[in-house]
Amino acid sequence: MSLSPTQVRHIAKLARLTLSDKEVSKFSRELTQILDYIEKLKEVDTKGVEPMSQITGLDNVTRTDTVIERPATTEALLATSPLPIVDQQIETPSSLG
Amino acid sequence: MISALTIAQAHERLKSKSLSAVEIARACIERIESVDKSLNAVVHRNFDRALEEAKKADKKGAFDHPLAGIPYLAKDVFCEEGVATTACSNVLRNKDFVPPFDSTTTKRLNTVNAISMGKTNTDEFTMGASTETSCYGVTKNPWDQTRVAGGSSGGSAAAVAADECLFALGTDTGGSIRQPAGFCGCTGLKVTYGRTSRYGVLSMASSLDSIGVLTKTVEDAAIVLGTIAGKDPLDATTGDMPVPDYTQTLKSGVKGLKIGLPKEYFIKGMDPQVETAVREAAKVYASLGAKIVDVSLPHSPYAIATYYVIVPSEVSSNMARYDGVRFGHTVPERDSLIEYYERVRSSGFGDEVKRRIMIGTYALSAGYYDAYYRQAQKVRTLIKRDFEKAFEQVDCLLAPVAPTPAFKIGAHTGDPVQMYLEDIFTAPVNLAGIPGLSIPCGFSKENLPIGMQLLGPQWGEEVILRAGYAYEQATEWHEKKPTM
């Protein structure tokens, strides 16, 4: 299984990353190596085996929707943003581009 | 040296008033100031507040809790109100992320007056096995500074081994506590998934991350675990299981205990010195009255491939939040939102994080999901079943932590797959969600520590702590200190 530079660019775009040409060729080589190693999984007979997404054995953990503590104020949470704060909101660049 | 005390020793001296909390905190601070320039284990220092808290603990004076007045360091992924937490990543460093809230673990420690002194080095977002992907540079091994301290909790392991603190917090997703503890010659406890709360700890792979501790002795690990374990309403994956007093059952010995040696953990290509040391440890157990049994975990050879599908898949989702909006790094160009995200992430993340995000994005994408992610989830079931079957025959398992002692800095940096194979004996444990305890069991001819791990069934921390303690009483490896 090899990943072409075009595929790497596509994956990077999906992941919101931009790569230089040099990075594209480096990652296409490295990601191919990793995928080659992962191919091993195809050897395993998993017919009839249930996939597992977590190991706790817990199922549908629910709780009542009440505030149990307020660890931080709105102002403190906003203060970690590197963008301008306007009327208790973060001003992001325009999504319309 | 005061900073070389164990928690249990320091507690006794605090109780008897032959030592104050301020004296212990000062000793650790002085030690950090004298050795950390070369080690690079501590990345954020919180010394003024530590001394203030130590003063308060002295004023209270009771020291009823075994951790009251005991200084510790936390891996740079534990949020602590008012203390920089950056996951050793440029994405959180350029404007240091200073969390406005506490992780449950540091909160539980600080509530009993343990003294938080700062943050330790880690691979970026804990992605690595050598601390080499940290934006602050590599942590050096206290036993040989041309070698890595391991990772990702390399800073915590080196800090404990070099007596910069009395204990340190770490996280273990595929070996990140056990392997550095093995490389640095200290004790490392990875708990059952769900035994400790992940709330307030920056996530890498949420179905595998577990919060644990690095200490100088097994008894100390039992003390800290008793304080941080237990259900947390802020982390729905924590279990409701009662938390036993781990220090109570610690000393009951291993007579009649059945210990399994999994044959897949003694493989061609590993350093023969590691194999010899672990087999010698099995003999020590036999001489203490334990029964040594050969067992098999047949799907072990597929654990790394499984792990490196599941982890990147979860990483690609967890890293989505670092977009330059709510926290961290930013760029001046702000023409469109999508381009802004791309610029922030591309300039903020290092190569290993980018590799994992991309592998995960690929493995989860339409057309590849069944072949990669779903198949890996099925193999994970088989790996978990392997362990369940083994624990029908034995009480715990004994295995090496890593195939070699600490490797040279730079040895694997050009080859991601080689670095991934570092986790070969540790990652299966996270896939199965069971606990593991790493303790020193010998030294190589280059005078590097060799680590072994004891693995227990789900929620079985008691049995591995008990087995670890018995070995520690019978041997002296844990008492050796690096000359610095």
Image (spheres, helix red, strand yellow):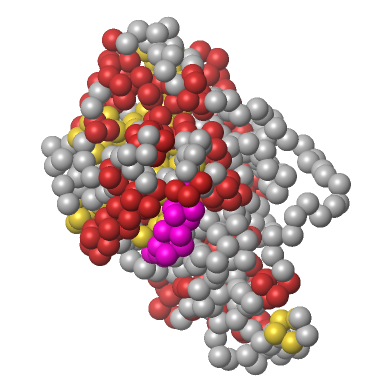
Quadrant in which the N terminus of chain B is drawn: top left
Is B45 a magenta residue? yes
Judge by depth and name the residue closer to the eye, B23 or B206. Answer: B23
Q: Residue B49, relative to residue B323: is it above or below?
A: above
Closest to the observer: B135 or B345?
B135
- Which quadrant would residue B196 be assigned to in this image? top right
Relative placement, left or right, of A42 versus B468 is: right
Seen at 56% across and 75% down, the residue is: B328
| Residue in front for this viewpoint, B197 or B435 | B197
In magenta stretch: residue B81: no
Question: Where residue B81 sits: x, y (%)?
Answer: 58, 62
- Measured as percent of width and height from the top left, residue B340 is found at 61, 84
Taking the spot 66% from the left edge, 72% from the top edge, the residue there is A76
Can I make out residue B139 in this image?
A: no
> In terms of image quadrants, where is residue B330?
bottom right
Can residue B397 be seen here? The reply is yes
* Rendering coords of residue B286 (x, y %): 32, 11
Residue at screen point 26% across, 36% down: B450
Q: Nearer the viewer, residue B241 or B163?
A: B163
| SS majority, magenta | helix
Residue plotted at (54% across, 44% down) = B112
Residue A75, percent from left and from top:
70, 75
Which residue occupies the extreme left position in the image?
B445
B61 horizontally vs A58: left or right: left
Magenta span covers which residues? B43-57
